[in-house]
Image (spheres, grey):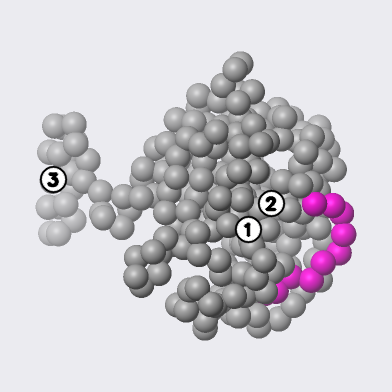
Amino acid sequence: MLKIVKDSVLKVSRSLGYDIVPLREMRERDFALHLRELLIRLEIDCVLDVGANVGQYHDFLRDRVLYDGKIVSFEPVARHVELLRARAREDADWHVEGYALGAHDEQKAINVMVSDQFSSFLEPDHRQVKEYEALNVASAQEAVAVRSLDVVLPALQERLGFRRPYLKLDTQGYDLEVLRGAGQSLQAVRALQTEASVLGIYKGMPGYMDTLRRLDELGFDITGMYAVSRDTALRLVEFDCVMINRRAVAS
């Protein structure tokens, strides 16, 4: 009965040009609509999903953004790579690379946290945000491969046939290191997003002002900013910042 009422209300509201969206989905909806328009306008033919975890961003792209092009997910933690590859068997345009991206090629220890979405090359720092003390703590360390985007991107483009990538960065404090290894690659990146930190939750992680300043120097302008998390005082902890390459605007 409840479903019938819900469907009827939605049908009437949409016939009048309105949509009814749960409050919890509002931020994600705004983000998805903006990203959909950006990907279409820039004719993006591949999304580079750096810091894939277990594929949440893939699902966001497919289910909310309605993007149906190629996705390359980069994830170093072994159990996540195994899960991603199993999931990718159901999506022919989803490709999984089992390594991290950074400033240069190396082997490096990653901290696998109790809540594995917090896993990072950096150590946790709870001085500013106390809420994550039980979650953002290392339960293990794992030796993983790190590659630079400048090294791997040409081979990926040759193998998969894309030319206009969008770069999504969510590396728990390591985004600037990825950019340091992408000096040549960024010329091809038409737009990107980075998870910028307002209140640091890792030792030595760059703040949002440093991140945005560096991306401005690299030729990117902001198109949207979307809150990711807040503390109990409603202070912003992190936000996703979407940016467009000035070369793409000029063209």
Report the amino acid beneath label 1: Pro
Q: Which residues are magenta?
A: 103-112
**Residue at the disc numbered 1:** 206
Membership of 14 in magenta stretch: no
Quarter of image, res 19: top left
Residue 104 vs residue 95: left or right?
right
Of residues 31 and 77, the one nearer the viewer is 31
Q: Can residue 96 be seen here?
A: no
Label 1 secondary element: loop
Of residues 52 and 161, the one nearer the viewer is 52
First-in-chain label (3 vs 1): 3
Label number found at residue 8? 3
Residue 138 vs residue 221: left or right?
right
Report the amino acid beneath label 2: Leu
Q: Nearer the viewer, mark 3 or mark 2?
A: 2
First-in-chain label (3 vs 2): 3
Marks 2 and 1, Cα distance to the nearest angstrom?
Answer: 8 Å
**Residue at the disc numbered 2:** 176
**What quarter of the picture does the C terminus occupy?**
top right
Q: Nearer the viewer, mark 3 or mark 1?
A: 1
**x, y percent for residue 85:** 68, 57
